[in-house]
Image: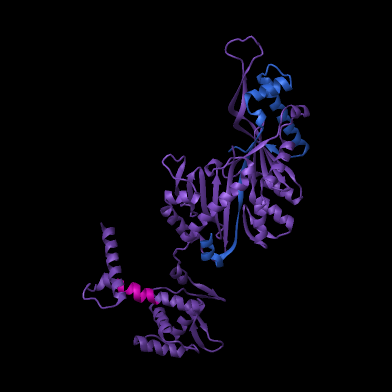
Chain colours: A blue, B purple
Amino acid sequence: METFRKLFASLLVLVYHCFDRVVIQGYLPLLTRPEHIVYFFRDVHKIYPITKQALRRRTQDYQQWVETFARNHRIPIQWPIRT
Amino acid sequence: MKKKGLRQEDYARPYLLAMERRKRFGVYFIFKTMEPGPNFRSCPPKYPTEDPGYRIIKRQWSRYTHFYFYIRDEVLGPMILCVGSFLPFPTRYWINGHSFIAVELQRQGVPFHKHDNAFFSVSDPEALQAAADRLRPEIIRPRLDYWTLVLGPKFSKKDRTAIALRRHYSLNQVEYCRNFIFRRNFPIHKLFQRSAELGVFCLTADKIAQIFGVLKHKRLRGKLHSMLQKLDHGHHVLRIYCKSLVARLYEKFSTFLRLEICVNRLKDLGLNKGLENLDALREKLVVITDRLAGLEARLLNVHVDFPLFQRLALPVISGKSKIPGIKIQDTRIIRLMEVLLHGGPQLAGWRTIQIWQALQAAFALSPQDYTLNQLRYDLRKMKGHGLLERVDKHYAYRLTENGARVSAMFVLFHKRVCGPLANSLFHHRPRRSPRPPAKIETAYHKADTAIQKLIDQLSA
């Protein structure tokens, strides 16, 4: 950096350094393993057996919530345009 | 999935601008996509068991719906939150340091000029750097928690008391950049092209390992090399790979030089991927970009071509008249330049008649060979190109600073470089010995040999 300043200081208007794009992953540590899922459905929600439908219900609930949220707040929601 | 050449961000941008105009914060667009992600599969066992409700729960990767929420946050600026709609509801967040800085500067009332993800000017550069350094985990985490709570899957109070449903955040990909904004008239584009070409040759594996601060050994995972990209577009990008780290050096907007490091695996820098390591990561990346800047400075300190002769050959407009260009083969102009250069310093400038007399004496010209009108025409041409100026309000002329340089280039090129070498090539080549004791003669001989070698190679 010192070399840069020494050679080009008079030609520089501005120098700065910063983070550009930061991608962060979020996860629920206690819902990441199959045994966590079993505990969550069987012991907490008393849903047994843990069928495909039981798992899917959570997804449907969430998808429905997103649709309603978008409608209520007038937010456009769409699939990316395909060419 | 997306339209060719149009990014999803570009598609949603009008909605962001509308939200900015209304000075509101929140979600402004939602994209729905089918993407692979982690989820769980429930399947009955292959053989019957005592418990009829027994199911095998397996973790797998499959495609399901993801929602991309485009958000305008009051602290982080525009950001994206992606939520997978299947258990375990994975989330991803895209934030940009430049957006955060812009929000901070706006809050402080510091005027700045930003385009895309680049600052071109700011009234207080120190405030900008301070704002950039303020992006810390303590600021990011509450905002991510907030938006996940608002937009993520809902869990009841019962769920929360039974299981600790607090999200953990890990750094998936981080880009850190060091930006140099040059003055508009500095020829950064050509310099950078040349330096990028040199960079590919001088960036050996040892040097790359030294820049990134990694140990080079036989079982090194990933890449260790440099390459040039986008050569055909005329916008060189010098990429340096080290393990899974990538450094990109490129120029944009003619004045902007960026050194950018993309970290895909924090372990390569000896760090864990938790969000709390963002500060430690910054410290490491500052050092690496600093070393890269040192290397780049040395590479930028090169000669590049400047099309002086082509530029002067073009006509210029002065008032309502068009003044023809000055061409390298124009003997009259070369003679005139030589006289103006070597005629001795004229403190009060040259009067036209004095120049005319000096030309006649130096080149044995008669008044008919080179008339006064022809001289006046040539002087007007040089004046039009800014090579000659009048001394105050007198009818006397002298070379401008640029004029002296251009004249030196013209005369040197024509008489000292091109002329003698052409003579060797087409007319008479002096023998190598005996050679007059002049360094310039040695240089001419060297140039003669080099040209001959080039001609031989071309004809082979």
Q: Which residue is drawn at 57% across and 56% down?
A: B179
Residue B418 colored in magenta in the image:
yes
Q: Quadrant of residue B437?
A: bottom left
Q: Is residue B347 above or below residue B140?
A: below
Image position, residue B243 (x, y; %): 48, 43
Q: Considering only vertical position in the picture, is B325 above or below B146?
A: below
Q: In this view, does B456 lie to the left or right of B280?
A: left
Give residue B190's position: percent from left, percent from top: 48, 61
Q: Number of marks in the image?
A: 0
Q: Which range of residues does the magenta coloring cover?
A: B411-421
Q: Nearer the viewer, residue B146 or B416?
A: B146
In the picture, which quadrant includes the C terminus of chain A? top right
Res. B87 in view: no
Q: In which quarter of the image is residue B112?
A: bottom right
Task: Identify the residue at horizontal 35%, vertical 76% (top origin).
Answer: B415
Q: Which residue is drawn at 27% across and 71% down?
A: B445
Residue at position x 48%, y 55% in the image: B234
Q: Considering the whole magenta stretch, tell me its main secondary structure.
A: helix
Question: In this view of the protein, which residue sits in the foreground, B16 or B156?
Answer: B156
**In the rendered structure, does residue B374 fall within the stretch colored magenta?**
no
The spot of residue A31 in percent (x, y) is: 66, 28
Q: Is residue A35 visible?
A: yes
- B147 and B455: which is toward the camera: B147
